[in-house]
Image: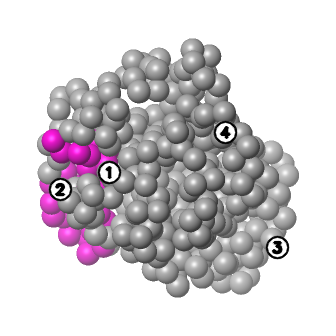
Amino acid sequence: TSPSVRFGAVNVADDAPTSPSVRFVDGASTPIEDEPADDAERDALEAFRARLAKDGVEIPSTLSANGGEPGVCLRFLRARKLKVEKALKMLRDCLAWREANDVDAILDEPLDLEEFKSNARMYPASYHGRDVLGRPVYIERTGSAKFADLVKKLGHDGFVKMHLRAMEYQSRVLLPSASADAGRLVSKMCNVIDVGELSLYDTVSHSEVLAVLREIAQIDQDYYPENLGVTLVVAAPWSFTAAWSVVKVFLDAKTATKFKVLGPGKAGVEKLTKVLGEGKVPAFLGGTCVCAGGCVCCDPRTGETADVLTTGQVEYARFAVERSGTRSGDGEVG
């Protein structure tokens, strides 16, 4: 029986941003499938499938919620420049890693809201609708994040697990929903990073923070290929350019090119608006959007709200997959 999805009751203002309904989770419905872009991809996909069949490698539904089986194959092929053997090794490594870390089960239970609020104060971020291409938008106030404190609280493994849950939510919930609403495949995220007064040198000077960031970057590159559309870096101080060279070494060349540092002032806001859309740039970044619960947790324009979390954060925290096939809870989607 296909698993269902359940949400706890979420009390939000009428004008607060609403997350799209969940359409495809863990094989609960047939996703919009990816397709080869040209003859080279078509030939590589055929050869890759033949190797999977020969070796008896099965693709789990948790990987194919968005783009279907061809989507999984093409993501790994594109990440390895259509080299079948290299893509096959990458996929095998991913499947082994997921099994060893029980990644498929990471969305089985909702988060404790009070604990999540505490963490969110140290790491203010939220999902914030979609951009002009239909991609889910994630906004993070990196400059206000207390990385060292959060790593100390959660521990190395706890911090990594926090990141993994977000990645699984994106690939198994947000992206499939975006595809369903667009009527076409939407396979990549749009990230907005508010650097503010962040000192990258101070951040990476903490060995425990550096170790966590390095592992997370490696996980994203190895096990979530072709997930990132663009990361827009905004409100960057003059020192960021120099410090960026320290962080960039964690990323492969292809990923690094997807990071775009926007200039300050009106020009930066205009560029951000071209990507996010009119009326979707948060006021604290120079735009006009002021969500009722804040565009992110602890939004500088609204301050900390009574509920602390934004609507998007509450829905994320309360999301869980019902593997039993029974339907329970408010707002479930089968």
Q: Which mark is residue 121?
A: 1
Q: Residue at x 23, y 45 (%)?
A: 308
Q: Is residue 307 above or below residue 203?
A: above
Q: Which mark is residue 8?
A: 2
Q: Residue at x 19, y 64 (%)?
A: 327
Q: Looking at the figure, which quarter contains the N terminus?
A: bottom left
Q: Amino acid at mark 2?
A: Gly
Q: Residue at x 44, y 20 (%)?
A: 287
Q: Which residue is mark 4?
A: 239
* Spatial CA span between label 4 and label 1: 25 Å
Q: Nearer the viewer, mark 2 or mark 3?
A: 2
Check residue 315 for magenta coloring: yes
Colouring style:
one colour
Q: Is residue 316 above or below residue 161?
A: above
- Mark 3 secondary-structure assignment: helix
Q: Amino acid at mark 4?
A: Ser
